[in-house]
Image: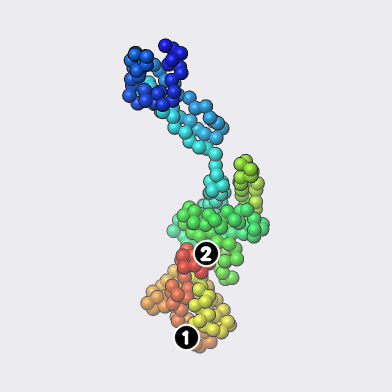
Amino acid sequence: MTEEIKALKHEQLAAFMASGSLELNGNTFSGDDIIVSLEYSGDKGQRDVEVCKDGDKQDGLVLLDTKPDAGMLDEATAREVCAKVQKMRKELSLRKSDEVDVFYASAADESMLTKVLSEQRAYVEGRIGRPLLPMASMPNLAVPIATEAKEVRVQRLVDGQIVASTEMLTVTLCRACAYFAEAALARLLPDATVRDGARTLVQYKDLAALRSQMGANGGTLKVTLDRTPVALTYGTHFFLGSAEAAKAGVV
């Protein structure tokens, strides 16, 4: 009878474990007669295995695939960059409520790191609370608070194997400032010199001053250029901080 029990098929054993009873050659067996030992025979290098128990009895296996895919590796790189940005904020004693804009530059525009940060933009923004923007998006009159060059580990899959390398990333934190919708601004102020003057006047103000001034004028920021009054509309011609600008698609 021992050999017949050892020869039971998977479906028979599964039914036995579910019902707790087995009919074999006219004999009835219970869980006290037959003990089923579960063991995973696959590649344990790519899976974590946990045996599920009901009291002293095994009733299943839980398999966790531990082999990362390309998306997981990219997220790990983005997470490392986020940690470096947060460390910079901490070292500068910045509070969570302090408005700063964050910009980056890598060694090459087409580098793997640049590609990862572009694709993981939403994830990074969720982690640091601000968009992480290419350095080219920084307004000319933005006020840098700190700039640091950091080494970032980048991982990718090559023929199913993880290949790691490092790339240099320059991160700049700036005081949050105004951003302009250039197309709308050009329609309002066709003269390039006048537009440049409007940008300069606005960029010299901090966000608190801008909010106060436009709040007093129903969402309109009024400036004077060469003795000519100009009215810039919030949400049309300009936005406050990189988060608003990114949401509006102007950076």
Q: Image point 51% across, 54% down: which residue?
A: 124
Residue situated in front as seen by the camera: 217 or 64: 64
Would you say residue 199 is visible in this rendering? yes
Q: Which mark is residue 229?
A: 1
Q: Quadrant of the N terminus?
A: top left
Q: CA distance from mark 1 to mark 2?
A: 27 Å
- Position of 205 relative to 164 (above/below): below
Would residue 107 appear left or right of 33 to someone viewing this image? right
Q: Image point 47% across, 85% down: which residue?
A: 229
Tell me how many marks there are.
2
Furthest residue toward right: 107
Q: Quadrant of residue 34?
A: top left
Q: Secondary structure at mark 2?
A: strand
Q: Image point 52% across, 34% down: which residue?
A: 47
Residue at image mark 2: 175
Q: Residue 169 at x, y = what percent?
A: 62, 55
Q: Residue 126 at x, y = what percent?
A: 46, 54
Q: Residue 183 at x, y = what percent?
A: 52, 76
Q: Secondary structure at mark 1?
A: strand
- Position of 173 relative to 203 (above/below): above
Residue situated in front as seen by the camera: 170 or 147: 170
Q: Earlier in the sequence, mark 1 or mark 2?
A: 2
